[in-house]
Image (cartoon, rainbow, N blue to C red):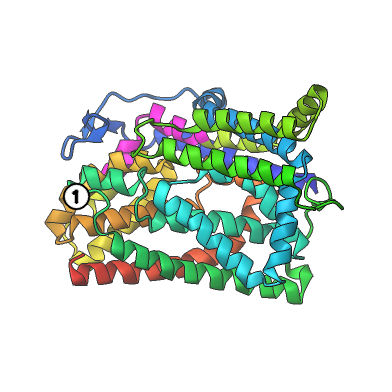
Amino acid sequence: MKKSRFPDSLVLIFAMIILAQLLSYVLPAGEFDREERRVVPGTYHAVEAAPLPWHAFLTKIPKGLEEGAEIIFFVFIVGGVIGIVRATGAIDALIGTALHHAGGSTLLLVAGMLALFALGSSTIGMAEEYMPFIPVMVTMCLALKLDAMVALGIVYMGAGIGYGCAALNPFTVQIAQRISDLPPTSGQGFRWLLLLVMLAVAVQHLMRYVRRIQADPSRSLVGDVDYSEGFSMPDDTRMTGRRLTILLVFAAGIALFAYGASELSGWGWFLVELAGIFMGIALFSAVMSSMSPNAVAKRFCSGAAELTMAALLIGFARTIEVVLVDAKIIDTVINGIAGGLEGMGPTVSVWGMLGVQSFCNFLIPSGSGQAFVTMPIMAPLSDLVGVSRQTAVLAYQMGDGFTNMLVPTNALLMGMLALGKIPYQRWLAFVVPFLLKVYVAAFIALAIAVRIGY
C-alpha cells in the first residue's frame, strides 16, 4: 500500500527533474531583457550556455528545497497548529455542526463549499491558505460516506476556478492588467459571469462522481487508501462556548491576513505573516482549552511530522523550476511558443494564447511570475492579431488557474495531494475529465470575448 501511495508522486517529480536537465542539453540558452521584473518584448537574445553537470539532477534538489523553504516551513507550522487546534475539539465540532445543519444534503455542502473556496481565490487570491482545510474536508467527506477525492476536489477545483476566472485577484489579474496598461479590476463583470458558469461545471462533475461512489463505494478512486488514522470523527462533537471562541479567533486570524495581504492595507503580508498568525491561534487555543505546555509541544510536533511527505514533495517540485532557470532555457521555450501565434486570426490566436499560457504554467507555476514573464509579450502581440488586451489577460488567467489543478510542478497541489493521501495518478483520473469540460467552456468564452470586443 505504501509503495503505491507516496512514492508514485515523488518518482514522477524526480523523473521530471531529470527531463528538465536533458532539455538543457538540447535547447539553446537565451534570455529576455527585464525592467523591474517585466520582460521587454523583442529583446530575446542568445546568452552563453550554462551547461549543467551530469549530477545536477541530484545537487539541485537541496537548492529546490531551499527555494521552497518558505512554503515548506509554512506546511510544518500549519501541521503543528492544526494538531493543537484539533486537539481542542473545535474543528470536529465545526464538522459535526455542519453535517447536522446540512440535513443530509450532499449537494448543498458540495456547491456551498466550492463557491466559498472559489470566492476566496477570485477576490483576494487565497490558495496556500487552504492547505489547513484539507484534513478537515477529508474528515467531513468521510463522515458523509464520501471519500478524500471529493474533499480535494471541493478545495482545489474551487481554487483553480477562482484563479482562472478571478475578478479581483491582486496576484494575477491585477498584475496582468497593470502590465497590459489596463485599469485595475476592469472587465470584471464578464469574469464574474464566467465564474458562475465554471462553478456549475464543477458542481456537475463532483456530484456525478459523488453519485457514482454512493451507488457503488468500490468505484472510489481512493477506496484502497487507509484513512483510519487522523481522519475519524471523535465521539464528542458538541459545540461549546470555548470551541466556538477558538473557531471565531481562527476565522478572525484568516480575515486579518486577508486584509494584510491585500493592496488596500499596503502591508504586503504573505506566508511568513500567515504562519505567525497561525502560531498565535495555536497559543490562544491551548490556553482556552487548558492544555499543558508538554501536551501542546507533543501535539505540535506530531502534527508537523504528519506533513513531512507533503513538505518533501513541495521541495522536489520546486527543483524542476530551479533546473530550468539555472540552465537559462525558460525564456527560450517561452519565446518560441509565443512567436508561433503571429499570423493567425483573432479567435484562433486567443485560443493559441490560452494554450501558450497553459504550457507556461508548467514551467512557471507562480501566477504572478508567469504574468511578469508572458504578459509583456502577449499584450503587444494581442494588438497585432486583433485581440483586445483584456481578452489576452483572460487567456492568461485561465491558462494559469485551470492548469494549476494539473501540473505536477505546482508545489501546492502536490502538497495537498500528500495531505489527502491521494496518489497523483488517481487525481489525474478525476480531474482531467473536468478540465476537458472547463477548456471547452474556456474556448467558447474566449470566442465570445473576441466577438463582443471584450
Residue at the outermost right position? 235
> Residue 208 at what x, y percent from top left?
62, 74
User: Mark 1 is on which residue type?
Assistant: Leu
Residue 329 is covered by the magenta coloring: yes
Q: What secondary structure do most residues of the magenta stretch adopt?
A: helix
Position of 19 relative to 405 (above/below) = above
> Residue 350 at what x, y percent from top left?
26, 61
Quadrant in the picture for the C terminus: bottom left
Q: Residues within 10 Å of mark 1 (few under 14, many from 20)?
A: some
Q: Is residue 369 left or right of residue 139?
A: left
Q: Is residue 414 left or right of residue 161?
A: right
Q: Residue at x 61, y 70 (%)?
A: 108
Range of magenta residues:
318-336
> Residue 14 at what x, y percent from top left?
58, 37
- Displayed quadrant of residue 175: top left
- In this rendered view, identify the residue nearer to me: 283 or 382: 283
Q: Residue at x 17, y 35 (%)?
A: 43
Mark 1 lies on a secondary structure that is loop
Residue behind mark 1: 182
Residue 436 is covered by the magenta coloring: no
Q: Residue at x 57, y 36 (%)?
A: 314
